[in-house]
């Protein structure tokens, strides 16, 4: 296969097959480049230099258009009539032109090869550097991934431990909450009982005061300062000072039930904080000149009448007041002076 000539314009480098412009400086151009560069013009001022080597093209035959595929008739007549020396000289110059174009094309290919080789080398170096950087980065990422995996395992174990601890704490909190609810319910029940006891005591005192019979119920705080009334075991009243208008003294034995049916349920009688003052008896003194025995109703008119309303339980003071079916009669003999 024959070597095809190419346009000597470095920006074109098109293969020539039909027609081309040939110069005496052994350069060849395609028709498009010749027209664009002005080499094929007939005026001498327009084709004074070669576009490839910048040689002067002053003569009309320095740049001619040739047919690269001549016909058989052209081949027969182009050298006809010329002497063998001229024919050999023309053939030698034509061969020199062909050899020059081939050599220039080889140089161009070598230059192109060298340029591409340099680019390839640079690209290879850059590629190797990029690959090394990528491998280093991949290795670093592998190490980082391994450390992150180990950290994840540690965090998972820590999370499991925290979860178990949280469950234990939650269970303990639930137990404490249940215990707190029980204590709170007990406290609320105690407050309700105390409130009910206070309400019952208040109602009891109000009822007795409205009925004309007052019972002093001391509180536990001041119980130590309140003296106990003195009643004898026989429930008899000392009337030695009745005729003289002096105050009467009552003695009582706490081992038996007090007068008026006042009892204490479930309370130890020796406790000072749970003692209560027995009802005070009101009456009129016996005149000193009388000789007859008077009834006990004269000394305590309100006691026997309102004694039936004392039934009830004092929850705060611990006193149980009940109505006796057969209350003991007060034996109070009058003394004749």
Image (cartoon, rainbow, N blue to C red):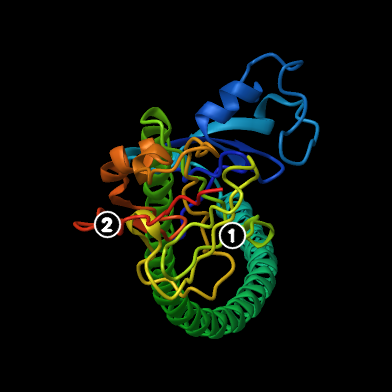
Q: 307 left or right of 214?
A: left
Residue 192 x %, y % = 38, 50
Q: Which residue is drawn at 61% across and 73% down?
A: 134
Say which quadrant the N terminus sits in: bottom left
Q: Which residue is located at x 62 percent, y 71 percent?
A: 127
Q: Toward which corner of the image does residue 250 lie, by quadrant?
A: bottom right
Which numbered dot is residue 188?
Answer: none
Label 1 sits on a secondary structure element that is: helix
Label 2 packing within 10 angstroms: few (<14), some (14-19), many (20+): few
Indicate the position of residue 57 as horizontal and vertical percent values: 75, 29
Q: Identify the residue under disc 2.
A: 327
- Classify residue 276 as left or right of residue 308: right
At which x and y percent is residue 146?
55, 84
Reading the image, the residue beneath label 1 is: 102
Q: Are marks 2 and 1 in contact (CB under 8 Å)?
A: no
Kind of element beneath mark 2: loop
Seen in the picture, residue 178 relative to 79 is either above or below; the reply is: below
- Residue closer to the observer: 185 or 241: 241
Quadrant position of residue 182: bottom left
**Front-lying residue, 160 or 228:** 228
């Amino acid at each position: 296969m024959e070597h095809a000539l190419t346009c000597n314009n470095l920006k074109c480098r098109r293969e020539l097959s039909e027609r081309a412009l040939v110069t005496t400086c052994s350069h060849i151009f395609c028709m498009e480049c010749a027209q664009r560069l002005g080499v094929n013009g007939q005026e001498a001022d327009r084709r004074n230099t070669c576009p490839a080597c910048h040689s002067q093209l002053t003569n009309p035959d320095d740049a001619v258009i040739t047919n690269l595929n001549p016909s058989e008739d052209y081949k027969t007549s182009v050298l006809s009539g010329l002497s063998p020396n001229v024919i050999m000289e023309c053939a030698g110059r034509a061969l020199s032109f062909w050899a020059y174009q081939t050599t220039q094309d080889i140089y161009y290919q070598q230059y192109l090869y060298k340029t591409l080789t340099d680019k390839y080398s640079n690209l290879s170096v850059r590629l190797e550097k990029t690959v090394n950087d990528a491998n280093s980065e991949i290795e670093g990422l592998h190490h980082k991934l391994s450390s992150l995996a180990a950290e994840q395992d540690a965090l998972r174990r820590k999370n499991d431990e925290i979860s178990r601890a949280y469950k234990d704490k939650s269970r303990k909190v639930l137990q404490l909450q249940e215990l707190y609810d029980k204590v709170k319910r007990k406290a609320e029940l105690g407050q309700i009982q105390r409130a009910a006891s206070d309400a019952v005591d208040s109602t009891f005192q109000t009822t007795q005061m409205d009925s004309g019979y007052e019972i002093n119920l001391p509180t536990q705080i001041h119980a130590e300062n309140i003296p106990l009334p003195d009643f004898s075991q026989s429930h008899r009243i000392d009337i030695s000072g009745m005729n003289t208008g002096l105050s009467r003294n009552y003695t009582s034995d706490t081992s038996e039930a007090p007068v008026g049916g006042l009892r204490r349920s479930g309370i130890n009688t020796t406790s000072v904080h749970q003692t209560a003052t027995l009802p005070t008896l009101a009456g009129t003194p016996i005149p000193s000149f009388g000789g007859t025995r008077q009834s006990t109703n004269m000394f305590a008119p309100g006691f026997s009448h309102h004694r039936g309303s004392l039934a009830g339980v004092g929850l705060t003071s611990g006193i149980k007041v009940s109505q006796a079916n057969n209350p003991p009669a007060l034996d109070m003999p009058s003394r004749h002076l």
